Image: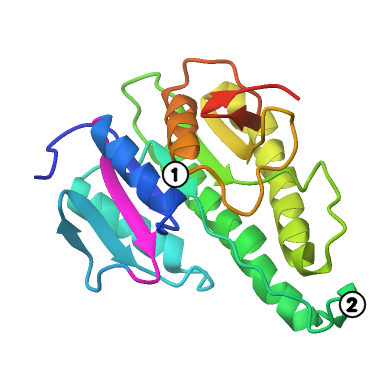
Amino acid sequence: MVLASGPVVLIFGAGANIGQALIKRFAEAGYRVAAVSRSGAEPPAITDGILSIRADLQETSAPTRALGVVKDIYKATPKVFIYNAAHQTSAPDPNNVFSIGTQTLNNDLSIMVSAPWTVATAAFEAWSAEDKTDDEQRTFIYTGNCMPQTIIPIVHLATVGVGKSGAAYWVQLADALYGKKGFRFFFADERTAEGITIGPVPGAESHAQFYLTLAEGKSDIPSYATFVDGKYRKF
């Protein structure tokens, strides 16, 4: 069943781990959910109450098209945009970080820096054009990691580190510029209780719980948002 009302969340990157947990948690919280992925429905379709949209995020027009589909079907602008996509290419020579070619680096950065920038641009323009009748927060959330603050000396993680670090800067910049306007931008960084990287398998439910908290806007959480077990923790 599709909800006739309720806030809309638009999720880019609806994979089997974090993406599916986000879909479930936000739907249970009363959100109308739209999920964008390379394996989504074409043409867009609603299945089990979730609007599925197929898109290749390396195409610069993909976010705008997806937003258009959401507005057409849900008749509303999403209050929450989540960017949950990433891409990692390992170095051909595991002992030489510079064996990663420039084009390979650029391809990965297009997913981790440029594509989310395009999504955030679409979000900002849509929110700015709204004839708001409420004072509720609008929220953009980027699935990050600890690498903007921690150098991990592993060659095959290079493109991820560069990508996440680049995104962390502009996400925090956007929040500094527009947070007081009610447009919040978060870089979400899951940690262990000791404050170190969560490792290669992030906590799906932890992300879902924390992202819903960020979307609700009830807590004064900074743009660079570190969390443990679904709850904000400052490190």
Residue 101 position by quadrant: bottom right
Q: Residue furthest left?
A: 1
Looking at the image, residue 39 lies above or below residue 13: below
What is the x, y in percent for residue 22? 39, 43
Tell me the crowding category of disc 2: few under 14, some 14 to 19, or many 20 or more residues within 10 angstroms, Cα based.
few
Q: What colour scheme governs how the chains and residues are painted in the rendered image of this protein?
A: rainbow
What is the x, y in percent for residue 1? 9, 45
- Residue nearest the viewer, comparing 110 with 161: 161
> Which numbered circle lies on residue 98?
2
Looking at the image, residue 155 lies above or below residue 212: below
Label 1 amino acid? Phe
What is the x, y in percent for residue 113? 66, 59
User: For the residue labelled by badge 1, is the local secondary structure a helix, a strand or a loop?
Assistant: strand
In contact (CB < 8 Å): disc 2 and disc 1 = no
Residue at screen point 83% across, 62% down: 154
Is residue 222 found left or right of 56 in the rendered image?
right
Question: Is 156 in the magenta?
Answer: no
Residue at screen point 76% across, 25% down: 235
Query: Which residue range is magenta in the image?
Result: 30-39
- Residue nearest the viewer, comparing 209 with 56: 209
Q: Which residue is mark 1?
A: 81
Is residue 64 found left or right of 119 in the rendered image?
left
Looking at the image, residue 84 lies above or below residue 184: below
Residue at screen point 51% across, 52% down: 84
Looking at the image, residue 125 lies above or below residue 212: below
